[in-house]
Image (cartoon, coloured by chain):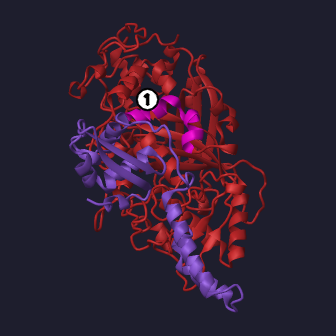
Amino acid sequence: MLELSQIQSNILREYRHGTAPAFVHFIFLRFGEAKEARDLIKALYPMVTSCARLDGGVPSVLNIGLAYPAVELFGFGGDARALNERDDEATGTIEAFKCGMRVRAAEILGDDDDSDPSNWEAPYRQGRLHAVLCLNAHTREKLDASLKLVGDAIASFPSVQRVHDEAAADFGGDLSGTEHFGFADGIAQPSVLDSGEPNYAGAGTPGKRRGWAPVKTGEFVLGHLDESGQVQFRSEFFKDGSFMVFRKLQQHVGRFRDYVNATAERSGTDSELVGAKMVGRWKSGAPLMLAPNKDDPALAADAKRNNDFRYKDDKEGKRCPIGAHIRRNNPREDPTGPGTIQTSKHRIIRRSTPYGTRLPEGASDDGQDRGVLFVVINADIARQFEFVQQNWVNSVLSSTVLTLPEDRDPLIGHQRNPDKAGKFLMPTAKRNKPPVIAWSLPRFVTTRGGEYFLLPSLDTLFHIGQGTRPPSDQEACESPAEQHDAPSPDGEVEATVPSDPDPAAGPGDGVVEPDPPAEPELVEPPAEPSGPADDDMSR
Amino acid sequence: MGARPLKKLSTLHFARVSIVNGNYMLFASVYDGDFMQYVEDFGTRIAKQIDTIFGACVGYPKAGAADVFQFKDFLAARQVPTNAFGGSYLDRSLLQIQASLRLTKCLGGFTRRVGAQHRRLVPKLDKFLHRHQDLLT
């Protein structure tokens, strides 16, 4: 069973359509002195929301993500390096995490031309970020109250630089849960084994004949059994954490609407249908596989039905085009795609919240910046997020039907410059009618920045705050490299840390305490230092 | 075992297995795209056949090709770089070449049957396109 009091809430909670928080705010930080950075973590620790705490009800949520430079600063770089050398599967994700998104963007994520990192917004382009604080709430007031507390905490540590803020909010009302292009977002999400969340049909891995099995925990929570039958990231530092991908994606709404309308007009069809074919769902979220001819809001509203489909009866893509956004990104058991086993190794949890004002229906482009703050939760950045982006969004290599590498994801793919732009084929079931082809796809989405973060367990955050090391789990110690008190391989200076000044104060002595929930049922980590820990990393 | 299992890999142009120096096996293949995707195709689509071919090799993963990560490392550690590589359609994927060839053939038949002057050219062409939708992707 999962220790839900150890796992940060944004890993397994509130990511489904309809449960997502309405107001989301990100604060990006760069640390100076390690001591102050630790003290900030210690101060924020009482507010950090675990899954268990969220289940008990909280007014607002705070989650903390650390980029690789912060892991080094806190003296845990050795854990990542040891893992990198020892662990076959973890190699890719640690490499990605170490480099950061900017280094991987052009080559792997396909961020070129206007999306090229050299064109990113300054905070994502200039120097590495150290940490992200993710705040959210269901009302503006509660978010603001939490923002004030967190802001005050940051301000009390002069060497901590508040580099940048991003704010996003749901459109509310009838438009709640939709993104700027007008489509319902966040419907198909993996159900995770033992997460305590419902396993809706269509959310997990399709069984041979029928039924859907939840995706193995280790695909989203580190240190648990994953789809390949292995347990990666066993060391206490990583266990019960996860990796978070943050991406700021600008959406060109006017361009999208114009293109869809022009394509519909040229081919004598309806623009709602052209848009739905590109996505694979109608605006309401009803999937084409279940509602091929017209939108069906009642179906879309039913979480038990709106994702319950397979592609096996649509090998030619006459209902849902083979290149459609949802079919590329989660091919299920698609006989023309990579197949069930391969798909199960590349699932991601998505959370996205729109930023910027909504362009009114029928209005022409107003030049305003709008898009989504897009977050992915996965255990292996390279195998999950990056793989999907590289092979399924920006290429066609998993398909047995799509043949042209230029034909990328019609919605989010980084189309090549106009003369090499891809097309999107919409096969038709109508007798003797030619398929509709959307030619010369422009880019509807531009990457504005992003970074990779680790979402450590509550225990790990506690120990970072205290300047101690998580007690090493003897069972997990299979090789000397994993013993936490072994000297770091590359001879970094390891100062002996003064023992915890006041172990009993533990998690309770933070400076901030939002609406005092009964002190959560956090499992209080044993606070005795288990060996020399690195502290003198601020050089 | 013939070439049948490899037909399941839509990115594989050619593969050749040979015995070198008596006790070494050389596996040479030409494929489209990313190494990881290719290895996963081995491990998830034709793992059994791959185990039959590679199973006797020193250092082969105990769980076979289905253990994609071990199998990837096994292959990567034994790769021999290609110093000279040539081909006629280096910028075309296998599926693309196959679809182009089939479409060319079908289109040839169509132009013979229905000339440019055919009075029902447009409906005929629509019907042709409908029948061959899969080749247009």
Q: Quadrant of residue A475?
A: top left
Task: Look at 26% across and 54% down and name the residue there.
Answer: B49
Residue A223's spot in the image, x, y percent?
31, 36
At label 1, which amino acid type do we have?
Answer: Pro
Question: Which residue appears at 79% of the width and 54% of the height?
Answer: A366
The segment highlighted magenta reads A90-109
Q: Is residue A364 above or below residue A106?
A: below
Predominant secondary structure, magenta span: helix
Q: Which residue is mark 1?
A: A46
**Above or below, A145 relative to B5:** above
Residue A217, percent from left and from top = 32, 45
Q: Which chain is red?
A: A
Residue B99 placement (x, y as % from top left)? 52, 67
Q: Nearer the viewer, residue A320 or A537?
A: A320
What residue is at 49 percent from the left and 75 percent from the top?
A291
A447 or A538: nearer the eye? A447
Looking at this rendering, what residue extends furthest in the front direction? B21
Q: Quadrant of the N terminus of chain A?
A: top left
Write down the colour of chain B.
purple
Categorize mark 1 by other alpha carbons within 10 Å: few (<14), some (14-19), many (20+): many
Q: Is residue A196 visible?
A: no
Q: Report x, y in % for residue A309.
A: 40, 68
Q: Is A100 inside the magenta-drawn segment?
A: yes
Which residue is at the front of the view, B56 or A306?
B56
Residue A224 falls in image quadrant? top left
